[in-house]
Image: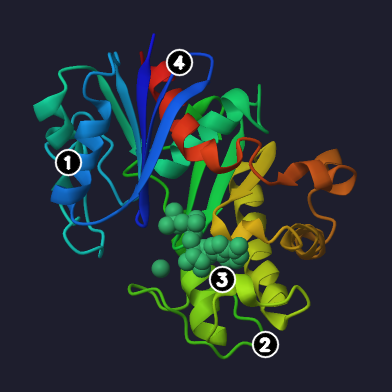
């Protein structure tokens, strides 16, 4: 059975066709433009592919509640043109097949728990640190939605004593995303993040903020594994800095082998690499159907 997957990102859309074993047979990517232009590309890609369902993991906030009148919408995003956009409705005009709609990060958490680093785990956290920051959580085998869905990028963090950057979240200024997203690094230092040398002070600050967030999620969700993806985490040298800071902040309070013996296997890069989002969209569909 062929299934369509869409990773709807704020910068780019990735569409693919896969099967129930998590093989991707075909994959395309294009920049996120206006909804009209972008959705023409999506529809053209999936036409005549013989897919039986489509899974969508989207940037948000979104409405993932099938009982809600605005189910399938991207809701309050500041991204021009995409606020209150009926993404599933648009797809339904062209494809009369089942669709599953969730956040990109919930999808990635499920994808990693199905085929990637979290394989077989029932409690797994996926965090992306890119243009924005978001988190998806699988808790006792279920993806967390609740009232809306988690918005882990906007938790509040303590400021580093050497950091006077005011923060760049349009809603909260110095929340986690405001202090640690890719754009926040670039605004703080005035250069592209990937050009900063590995010994630059930027990375110590970055690890400081990411570790605080992880400690909060460890203490609230108790994940069995934490997977960190997104553009910023391509900086692999961040991992040891983050792990060290997590241990320091927990300060002996959570005495588990994951943290004290195997932290290198506890806080990790996505096993599915750049396909985490797309495979996540496929995993969402397989879980639902
Ligand atoms: P998106 O969040 O749009 O899905 P990404 O996860 O690739 O896309 O995040 C893009 C952001 O990540 C860029 O704004 C940039 O700041 C940062 N970034 C991308 N690649 C790197 C890299 N190699 N090193 C550090 N930061 C990066
Ligand atoms: Zn915020």
Q: Residues within 10 Å of mark 4 (few under 14, many from 20)?
A: some
Residue identifier under label 3? 157
Residue at left 37%, top 57%?
Answer: 11
Residue 213 visible here: no
Q: Earlier in the sequence, mark 1 or mark 2?
A: 1
Closer to viewer: mark 4 or mark 2 = 4
Query: In which quadrant will I find the N terminus?
Result: top left
Q: Earlier in the sequence, mark 4 or mark 2?
A: 4
Cα–Cα gap, marks 4 and 2: 50 Å
Residue at left 66%, top 21%?
Answer: 120
Q: Position of residue 167 (x, y in %)?
A: 47, 81
Which picture quadrant has residue 232?
bottom right
Cα–Cα gap, marks 1 and 2: 48 Å
Q: Which mark is residue 161?
A: 2
Which picture quadrant has residue 45?
top left
**CB of mark 3 within 8 Å of CB of mark 2?**
no
Q: Position of residue 114 (x, y in %)?
A: 58, 23
Residue identifier under label 4? 19
Q: Mark 3: which secondary structure?
A: loop
Cα–Cα gap, marks 3 and 4: 40 Å
Q: Classify residue 111 as left or right of residue 11.
A: right
Closer to viewer: mark 4 or mark 1 = 1
**CB of mark 1 within 8 Å of CB of mark 3?**
no
Q: Classify residue 66 as left or right of residue 207.
A: left
Q: Earlier in the sequence, mark 4 or mark 1?
A: 4
Query: In which quadrant will I find the C terminus?
Result: top left
Q: Residues within 10 Å of mark 1 (few under 14, many from 20)?
A: few
Residue identifier under label 1? 40
Q: Classify residue 50 as left or right of residue 168.
A: left
Q: Mark 4: which secondary structure?
A: loop
């Amino acid at each position: 059975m062929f299934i369509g997957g869409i990773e709807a990102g704020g910068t780019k859309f990735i569409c693919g066709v896969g099967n129930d074993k998590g093989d991707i047979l075909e994959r395309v990517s294009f920049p996120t433009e206006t909804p009209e232009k972008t959705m023409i590309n999506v529809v053209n890609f999936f036409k005549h592919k013989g897919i039986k369902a489509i899974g969508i993991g989207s940037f948000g906030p979104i409405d993932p509640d099938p009982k809600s009148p605005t189910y399938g919408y991207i809701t309050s995003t500041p991204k021009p043109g995409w606020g209150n956009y009926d993404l599933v409705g648009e797809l339904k005009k062209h494809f009369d097949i089942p669709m599953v709609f969730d956040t990109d990060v919930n999808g990635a958490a499920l994808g990693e728990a199905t085929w990637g680093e979290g394989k077989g785990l029932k409690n797994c956290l996926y965090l992306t640190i890119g243009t924005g920051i978001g988190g998806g959580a699988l808790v006792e085998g279920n993806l967390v939605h609740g009232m809306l869905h988690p918005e882990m990028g906007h938790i509040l963090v303590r400021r580093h004593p050497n950091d006077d950057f005011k923060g760049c979240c349009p809603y909260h200024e110095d929340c986690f995303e405001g202090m640690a997203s890719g754009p926040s690094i670039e605004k703080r230092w005035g250069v592209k993040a990937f050009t900063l040398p590995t010994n630059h002070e930027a990375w110590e600050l970055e690890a400081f903020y990411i570790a605080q967030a992880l400690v909060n999620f460890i203490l609230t969700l108790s994940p069995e594994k934490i997977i960190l993806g997104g553009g910023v985490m391509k900086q692999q040298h961040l991992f040891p800095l983050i792990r060290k800071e997590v241990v320091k902040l927990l300060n002996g309070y959570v005495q588990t082998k994951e943290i004290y013996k195997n932290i290198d296997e506890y806080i990790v890069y996505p096993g599915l690499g750049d396909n985490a989002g797309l495979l996540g969209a496929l995993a969402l569909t397989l879980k639902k159907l």
